[in-house]
């Protein structure tokens, strides 16, 4: 179930419950909005958070050692150990907990998990602020929070690298500097795309209102690949020059020493 669909499912329940509690309409709408934003993320993250909490619980109860979440994320228990710390919310549904445990203990799942974690650690900044939302869902949420303002794909992609869709401070400005984004490479990609799009569509082309152009994306990618190859070739050329210089200096030093020895 998508987060948008999940939010639509939760909203009526929250609204009815808040009405029964006598919450005023203006506060009720705000509370429902917050719940619809937070609950889907909590539900989709439950599978991962449950494993980390199980590790912390096992170390606390069985080993008498308190560990932080960051450390627990790197520790893997055995199936038997996971089964010793079934959380209260799953105590009457051990078959569900067993399903989680078998998945956590699957070598392929662990391998994928570790690979994704390593990839995230290599990033100079957060990948994005979409959470588990697709780009379309991020755009829909941002538009809803900002009074129905249109949010084309390029604008959504840019803002997803600036902050959460629910933040009223997040907006897109083509003139924003690199530090406005969570990852410095985002600014360069947007600049390259915008520059090429204006070469094709004219100087008045506005990235904040236009849809993505597949042809321009391909051209931008090709240009990035060509520039990367040129940088690689330049680096190789400089490395060869440096190596030749080192060899030349070594031969020169040997020749100087030989000449000095012949003089004496």
Image: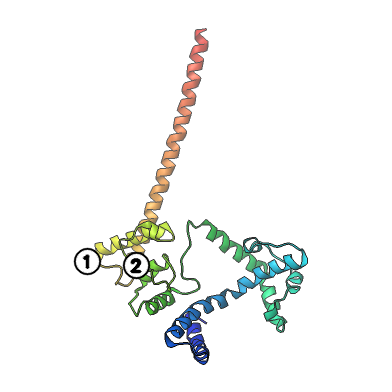
Q: Is residue 27 above or below residue 199?
A: below
Crowd class of label 1 (few under 14; some 14 to 19; many from 20; radius 10 Å): few
Q: How many marks?
A: 2
Q: Nearer the viewer, residue 198 or 120?
A: 120
Q: Secondary structure at mark 1?
A: loop
Which residue is pictured at 73% across the width and 73% down the height?
Answer: 85
Percent of width and height locating residue 229 = 40, 51
Q: Along the horizontal axis of the image, is 106 left or right of 234?
A: right
Q: Nearer the viewer, residue 66 or 171?
A: 66
Percent of width and height locating residue 209 = 29, 72
Crowd class of label 2 (few under 14; some 14 to 19; many from 20; radius 10 Å): some
**How far is mark 2 from mark 1, CA to CA?**
17 Å
Instruction: Judge depth for marks 2 and 1 and give the one in front.
Output: 2
The answer to whether residue 5 is visible is yes
Q: Along the horizontal axis of the image, is 225 left or right of 56?
A: left
Percent of width and height locating residue 105 = 69, 69
Residue 204: image tag: 1
Which residue is pictured at 47% across the width and 74% down the height?
Answer: 133
Lower position in the chain sequence, tag 2 or tag 1: 2
Q: Is residue 121 above or below residue 31?
A: above
Q: Along the horizontal axis of the image, is 25 left or right of 92?
A: left
Q: Which residue is mark 2?
A: 172
Is there a contact, CB below 8 Å, between mark 2 and mark 1?
no
Percent of width and height locating residue 26 = 42, 84
Q: Nearer the viewer, residue 25 or 91?
A: 25
């Amino acid at each position: 179930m998508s987060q948008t669909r999940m939010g639509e499912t939760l909203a009526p329940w929250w609204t009815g419950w808040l009405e029964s509690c006598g919450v005023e309409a203006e506060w009720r709408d705000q509370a429902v909005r917050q719940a619809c934003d937070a609950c889907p993320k909590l539900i989709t993250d439950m599978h991962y958070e449950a494993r980390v909490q199980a590790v912390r619980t096992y170390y606390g109860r069985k080993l008498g050692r308190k560990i932080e979440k960051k450390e627990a994320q790197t520790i893997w228990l055995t199936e038997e150990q996971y089964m010793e710390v079934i959380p209260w919310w799953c105590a009457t549904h051990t078959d569900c907990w067993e399903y989680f445990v078998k998945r956590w203990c699957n070598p392929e799942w662990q391998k994928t998990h570790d690979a994704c974690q390593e990839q995230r650690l290599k990033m100079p900044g957060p990948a994005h602020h979409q959470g588990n939302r697709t780009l379309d869902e991020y755009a829909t949420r941002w538009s809803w929070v900002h009074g129905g303002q249109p949010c084309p794909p390029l604008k959504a992609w840019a803002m997803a690298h600036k902050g959460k869709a629910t933040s009223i401070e997040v907006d897109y400005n083509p003139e924003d500097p690199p530090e406005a984004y969570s990852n410095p490479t985002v600014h360069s990609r947007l600049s390259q795309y915008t520059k090429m799009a204006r070469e094709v569509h004219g100087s008045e082309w506005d990235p904040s209102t236009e849809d993505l152009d597949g042809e321009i994306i391909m051209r931008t990618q090709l240009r990035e690949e060509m520039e990367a190859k040129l940088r690689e070739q330049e680096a190789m050329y400089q490395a060869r020059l440096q190596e030749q210089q080192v060899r030349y200096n070594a031969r020169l030093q040997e020749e100087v020493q030989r000449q000095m020895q012949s003089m004496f």
